[in-house]
Amino acid sequence: MIQLNNISKAFGGQTLYEDISFILGPKERIGLVGRNGSGKSTLFKIITGELSHDGGSINVPKSYKIGYLRQHLEFSKSSVLEECIQSLAKEEEFDHYKAEKILSGLGFSEEDMSADPLSFSGGYQIRINLAKCLLEAPHLLLLDEPTNYLDIISLRWLKNFLKNYQGEVILITHDRDFMDDVVTHTMGISRGGLKKIKGVTANFYERLIEDELVYEQTRANQEKKKKELMSFVDRFRAKASKATQAQSRLKQLEKMGTMDELAKEGNLGFSFRYTECPGKVILTADDLSFSYSGSDDELLFKNLKLDIKREDCIGIIGKNGKGKSTLLNVLTGELKQNSGEIKYHPSAQVGHFGQTNINRLSEGMTIASEVASSNTELSFSEVRSICGSMMFEGDLADKKISVLSGGEKSRVMLGKILAHKSNILYLDEPTNHLDMEAVETLCEKLEKFPGAIVLVTHNEMFLRRLANRLVVFREGGAEVFEGNYDEFLEKVGWDEDIVQTAEVVKEEKFSKKDLKRLRAELVSERSKESKPFRKRMDELEKDIFTKEEKIDEINNSLIEVSSSGDGSKITELSKNLGVLQKLLDIEYDELSELTDKYEEIQKSYETRLNELEL
């Protein structure tokens, strides 16, 4: 357990926080939230002692061990496994399986574990650091944006690992679903203060809004009281009979102090410029294959067929390094396919946010000029408005690209997409440099975008809210799944989830192959048993919708004929209305009964599937 008391920290005259305090209790897993630049990572460095604090104290028990996911990449061994084994405790130094288990969960194959750490990309090297941090098994894990470097499969593994972690955790992530699934408490930095509450992020933000409303009401009441006191002082200070009372009011004013009005907190704004596409299908890809070497023996995907309709959102999912971003670049024409054909509708207009696109920004140009280059029809004020929506207000828009951080360059790329008219958006991990509030805003705007979206993301919330179809990368290539992400998990699922199950079902002695077969059989049985219920429920929902529309029409007709006094018409309409209402009640009752039975089936199978995971 650690305790922070009245901690303050400022940089260059800017105060991050002042007199903040909190206690970390046993087995607590805390999600740390706050705007970019609010001081979340700085707080981690203060806790670890990497940064000094300007005031206050930190109490950490002598034997309390803190593990911190470091971005600094430094390796001393010639293989990934040897590098990670160093992090095991002395009494566990020969328990190599523990390192293998964690590395496997984070996406390393047996071949990868034998490779030199320096042979991997920066993202995978951060995964090695994460594995080392987890293997240390510290009392407290400090994890700063661990999901940025993970694919959706290793992210799901880490989520399960943290939920079962026996120590304390403080987690920074822009992935709200990930945080909510893991944490017991949420703690936020806001306006230089710190607040910790029990529960998920929604609980925290509700409390924050309530507290700010109370503050503003109190401030308004104080201002009103001040004006009343000042009015009394101004009116009576010159009158001898009231001078004492006026002086008393003046002292009251001096003691009241000042409550500053809460400044409006900035957030990214996303307003996509949609241009109409008259065709129903924006893109058709047929028999696509690709390999970087050009060899058919090293294909990342082959024989891929994909139609993208005007209002589709295609989620591209799978392990890192399997070809997700490559497929995006093939579809946009930045890479040439080995075989196959891609046809765009003549009115298609593409907006593309790629992970490497920031490298194409011109270092000598300003932010405003880069944004303007995406659409020469924009006026000066429109360009400045887009810059402001990306948090480059006023003179900040005149900063050169060369002085920007990676996160700021990503915002410039987003600004260029906002400037460009489009009806199909290609987005490759667009959330990586955004804070939680900006991620939510982006998701809301994409939900309202009337065109097509093709999205590579490890963010399961994004997938659930946006994607209606998927391209799934697995061993051996990619295939289209006609359904949303939850349907994919229900009907297909990730093989790696089965492997994780196999690690803990020791008493059953099932092989990975057996577990996969058992799960597939259960999923198939569940689908077969629940399908008739689902089909009838869908039919009822359509019938109910139709009847409710008809009832609305009859009610409107009744209003019209009532004014004319046509008694026979009123009787006829009322009779029809009564019949429809009875039928509607019957269908609602049937739907309610079927829904209960359907949920019972789902719950029954969920229990049996969970038993395989115990």
Image (spheres, rainbow, N blue to C red):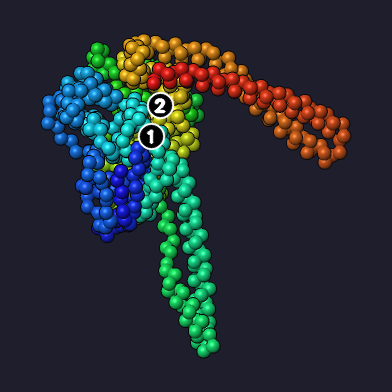
Q: Quadrant of residue 480?
A: top left
| Amino acid type, label 2 | Gly
Return the x and y of residue 477 as percentages of the image width and height.
Answer: 32, 16
Q: Which residue is mark 1?
A: 182
Q: Which residue is mark 2?
A: 315
Instruction: Decide which of 401, 108 is in the foreground and name it.
Output: 108
Q: Residue at x 37, y 25 (%)?
A: 316
Return the x and y of residue 143 as percentages of the image width and height.
Answer: 29, 38
Residue 255 showing in the rendered view: yes
| Amino acid type, label 1 | Val
Q: Residue at x 37, y 51 (%)?
A: 194
Q: In which quadrant of the rendered image does the N terminus lie?
A: top left
Q: In which quadrant of the rendered image does the C terminus lie?
A: top left
Residue occupying the far bottom of the picture: 240
Along the horizontal axis of the image, is 385 left or right of 337?
right
Q: Secondary structure at mark 2?
A: strand
Q: Secondary structure at mark 1?
A: helix
Within-10-Å neighbours for mark 2: few <14, some 14–19, many 20+: many
Q: Residue at x 28, y 56 (%)?
A: 56
Return the x and y of residue 260 as percentages of the image width and height.
Answer: 42, 63
Along the horizontal axis of the image, is 217 left or right of 99?
right
Q: Measure the alpha-carbon separation of dots 2 and 1.
A: 24 Å
Tally the numbered discs. Answer: 2
Q: Residue at x 22, y 18 (%)?
A: 110
Q: Quadrant of residue 501?
A: top left
